[in-house]
Image (spheres, coloured by chain):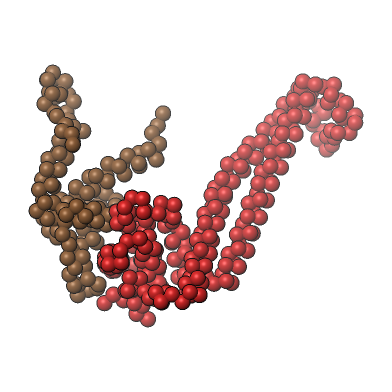
Chain colours: A red, B brown
Amino acid sequence: MNQFPPVVAMIANDYLKRVKSQLRLVPAPERDEFLREIQSHLYEAYRQTPGDDDVARILAVLEKLGEPAEVVSDRLPGAMVRSGTKRNLPLYIVGGLLIALFGIPLGFGGIGVLVGLLAALAGVLAAYYAVAGSVLLVGAVFMSMGVVRILLPGLWDKLVLLGFIQINGLPLFDYLSPSEQGLVLILFASVFVASGLGLLRLGKHLLRGLHFLFRLALDWVRRFARSIRRQLRRDKLAGLPVGGLSFVADR
Amino acid sequence: MEYSDDGRDRRITQMRKGILELAVMGVLYHERHYGYSLVRVLTETGSISLKEGTVYPILARLDRDGLVRSEWVESDQGPPRKYYALTSLGRQLFDELSQEFELLVSLVQRDWKAREQSEHAGKRLVVRKG
């Protein structure tokens, strides 16, 4: 009985398809035998993985098994391993979860939503960096004001006279000596500079996250385009399951 | 200065690659296994975490070199299983490799205090090449 719930069958078959696509240069009999072996592994591992959540179980199995590129690495002569196309398992897990949640592969509408989401996220990221930049700029301005106050009091007075520097609402400031005022400004500036640098550092994580999502989206679009191409060509293999076999959904 | 996690992981991976093949041969020396049961045996002590997919490239390599033979066996619980067992050539090679392995282990774990006491002890240990 190699029967899986539909969602599990879908995820397992998708994995097998990815293994198959890695093996496209391997002679068909050898390839099909290997796919049967991996199918057997998925079945055994799934059966022995405890849990009530079917999707979590099959994803745990796939995560333990590893990326198709790793699984097939010695089935091919070294030069034939498609090193550049190795996909990350997290991509697969997110994809699997989405398929599990929505139950459908993404169509044109899905791609539209995806592009919109990514554009929004890119906007958020741009705004984030704009804020980080502004905070740094404010820090730099205060820093130079502090330096001018300490080293060039004459210039400071001139700037105040000309109205470039206006310090209002801070009566305490006037009680301080010029160098103390300068120090206060530099201290104030340091807080801004530190915040700005902190924001830039945190931004790296945001960038990495966005990069990940872009790759995820590209992956989907590529897969979607491939499925459309296959349909258009009406390739006789298009409708066939992997290697002539696949998991059967029991519902 | 501390070593980097990447550097450590890379070295562990390199070390495991060779030794894992030997471990797979060791398991198949005594009884036949299919991929998943082999993984279970290798990980049953819980002391090593293994990407399960790594056994398949190893099995492919051993198969290609004629060190294992395989056969499909029907299972009453699911799809057929592909069982592997070591060939006589594989057994012969395993015997040799495991001797080599023991030498290497003794090289790593030799007792330095005992060695210091005996001036010529180092000469006893010979690592064969090839």
How far from the left and from the top, in percent, is residue A47?
Answer: 28, 69
Residue B103: which quarter of the image? top left
Q: Nearer the viewer, residue A77 or A240?
A: A77
Residue A89: percent from the left, percent from the top? Answer: 42, 57
Q: In which quarter of the image is residue A9?
A: bottom left
Q: Is residue B52 visible?
A: no
Q: Is B30 placed left or right of A82 in the picture?
A: left
Q: Against B124, is A76 above or below? A: below
Residue B72 in the image: state x and y as whole percent: 19, 68
- Identified at 19% across, 47% down, the residue is B22
Q: Is residue A155 above or below residue A71?
A: above
Q: Residue furthest top?
A: B119
- The single residue placed furthest to the bottom in the displayed view is A251
Using the image as rendered, state which of residue A80 and residue B20 is in the foreground. A80
The residue positioned 77% from the left and 20% from the top of the image is: A151
Residue B70 in the image, given as x and y percentages of width and height: 17, 62
Q: Measured along the vertical axis of the image, is residue B11 above or below residue A58?
A: above
Image-based side of A95 in relation to A16, left or right: right
